[in-house]
Image (spheres, coloured by chain):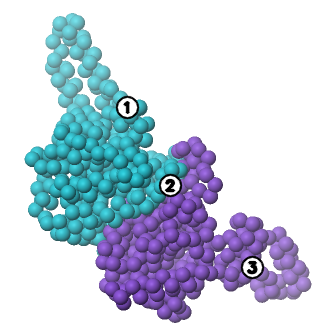
Amino acid sequence: MYSLKEGNMISFNRSNKPTIIREQETIKTSDWVKCPSCKSITYQKQLEENMQICPKCNFYFKMNAKQRISLLLDEGTFQEINPDLKSFDILGFEDTKSYAKRLEDSMQKTSLNEAILTGKASVENNPLAIGIMEFEFVGGSMGVVVGEKIVRLAEYAHKENLPLLIISSSGGARMQEGMFSLLQMARTSGAIGRFQQNNGLYISLLTNPTTGGVSASFAFLGDIILAEPGATIGFAGARVIEQTTRQKLPPKFQTSEFILDHGQIDKIVERKHIRRLLGRILTFYKRGSIYS
Amino acid sequence: MKNMLPFEKPMADIVTKIEELEIESKQSSIDLSSSIELLKAELESESRKIFSNLSRWEKVQLLRHIDRPKTIDFVKTLIPDYIFFCGDRLFHEDPAIFSAMGTFGDRNLMVIGHNKGKDTKENILCNFGCANPEGYRKALRLMRLAEKFNAPIVTIIDTQGANPGIIAEENGQSEAIARNLREMFSIQVPIIAVVIGEGGSGGALGIGVGDRVLMMEHSIYSVISPEGCASILFRDSTKAQLSAEQLKLTAKDLYHFNLIDEIIPEPLGGAHRDPRSAIENVVKSIQTHLMVLDKLSPSHLMDSRYEKYMNLASYDSIQRFNG
């Protein structure tokens, strides 16, 4: 990062109108991203072209909901449902920041109304109902609105006779909504259960991270559960487990690879292969429903 | 006063005075009964004052009182002739979940609850009521068994949360809880969930989906423990008291928000001051609710349970708290 600052200095010195030229000619430090794994620095645009994967070490950066749409769905097929549901501060909650402010900041940062987008789309010409979580929105946490959107999505998938895909990325239940958020675990699980009972297919894709109240509800109820490589997936926080048990955690504890070994998921899928795999599963499913 | 809590100090002072007068009256054979009666009346009104104005944090302290009745005490009163069952048939027996069937009035009843244990040895054996996946799986197995005996299910909630452990994660703590949340919607007998102490997060909810959710007066039910909230959101473990206030986790709060069906009153001073009548109140309440639920057919029961949760804490239902 230091060398970039020097770059700024040079352009500054060469110009009589430094402010304008700085904006035009130099690359902002925010355009560069440091890989938390191998510490190498990559240009943001290059990272996006590489599906948010570090070109040096294959580390998976988080993808936002919009990037997921363009990665997985047939172009222009996503139609959002219930886009206008918004959260508010039910309890009057304030920690280091007020919850109302946190919501406002998240909306600004993500240009979304909540931590999940739900709707209808198609993957390789197979129509499906889809929910995509947005981690940048209050840590992807599940409050009333996230729960409600999942419940409505499951009911929508049932009504429209569509297979259901939910892509999780969440720290868990939204503490700022207290008991209202805990109950979303029951609501989402109940709605998914009813959808599955009616022979609906539910595919759950776990991405980094999927923990707490989200992993202990709809995320682990998939008929098929897939995960991206290297994602943190688990119920309790690793720090809490370490403090409670006073034991050293096993290598790769609570990663996709770890839970695959322990029989909890079907498959780890690289980002570049997810669309193709989903397309195949959905084609098989369609074939099955023709024969039934 | 035995095992006094900090906020009970004014009461304890009066108790001490009463005790002193009683000794004095015995030794000196002077009749001090009128003074003693006055003090007793004062004690009663002081207790009422204190216990009707407990802060949320004081309730947290109260429900963690060492003498507060535990799941096993309720089981003994509810179904005195109980048979208890073990094992998830997959991995282990988890003593953190106690499950037993017995006679309630003239019918079968299955009771499934968090088991904290009564003394240190038992506490450790049952991991203070923090269950592992095998505990949740055992609970579900026995809910299915209850269907065969046409036994309504009472779940008793008293846990700080599901066990945060290495083996628990390896065995799928998330999946075990998630599965219970889903499957409890398709249990064909009535389910009544009663929070008797601490309703801690997913570990509580994992046996807590019911046709009725009841809470004892001084119990709490929360998305996270006040201590957990303090360390995660405030990044300061000393902020537990503040967290308890923010989380709105008491029976009174949750009844106000329409998230539970009933608050079961406790004797003055909390359940531990008079366990027998505290338990009796719970038994009566279960009886009343069962009388209503008994009349529903299995499909009606499951449909209304589903409807209950789809309306509970829903987007539409919270709008009246907006602004």
Q: Quarter of the image for the N terminus of chain A: give it.
A: bottom right
- Mark 2 belongs to which amino acid? Glu
Q: Callout 1: few (<14), some (14-19), or many (20+) C-alpha neighbours within 10 Å?
A: few
Q: Chain of mark 2?
A: B
Q: CA distance from mark 2 to mark 1?
A: 27 Å
Q: In percent of the image, x 51 and y 84: which residue is there?
A: A280
Q: Point out the image quarter for the C terminus of chain A.
A: bottom left
Q: Which of pointers 2 and 1 lies earlier in the amino acid sequence?
A: 1
Q: Residues within 10 Å of mark 2 (few under 14, many from 20)?
A: many
Mark 2 element type: helix
Q: Identify the residue shown where x is 17% and y is 7%.
A: B29
Q: Residue A130, position in %: x, y?
A: 45, 81
Q: Which mark is residue B169?
A: 2
CB-based contact (under 8 Å), mark 3 and mark 2 = no
In the picture, the disc for residue B119 is 1
Q: Can you name the residue that lies furthest to the front here? A: A291
Q: Distance between the Cα atoms at labels 3 and 1?
A: 60 Å
Secondary element type, mark 1: loop
* Chain depicted in purple: A
Task: From this view, report whether residue B273 is shown above or below residue B151.
Answer: above
The residue under label 3 is A43
- Name the amino acid type tagged 3: Tyr
In the foreground, B213 or B79:
B79
Relative depth, front residue between B234 and A40? A40
A267 left or right, relative to B213: right
Marks 3, 1: nearer the viewer? 1
Q: Chain of mark 3?
A: A
Nearer the viewer's eye, disc 2 or disc 1?
A: 2
Question: Can you give x and y, in whole percent of width and height, for residue A205 in the image?
Answer: 50, 73
Q: Residue at x 48, y 52 (%)?
A: B168
The answer to whether any part of residue A20 appears in the image is no
| A156 up-or-down from B276: above or below | below
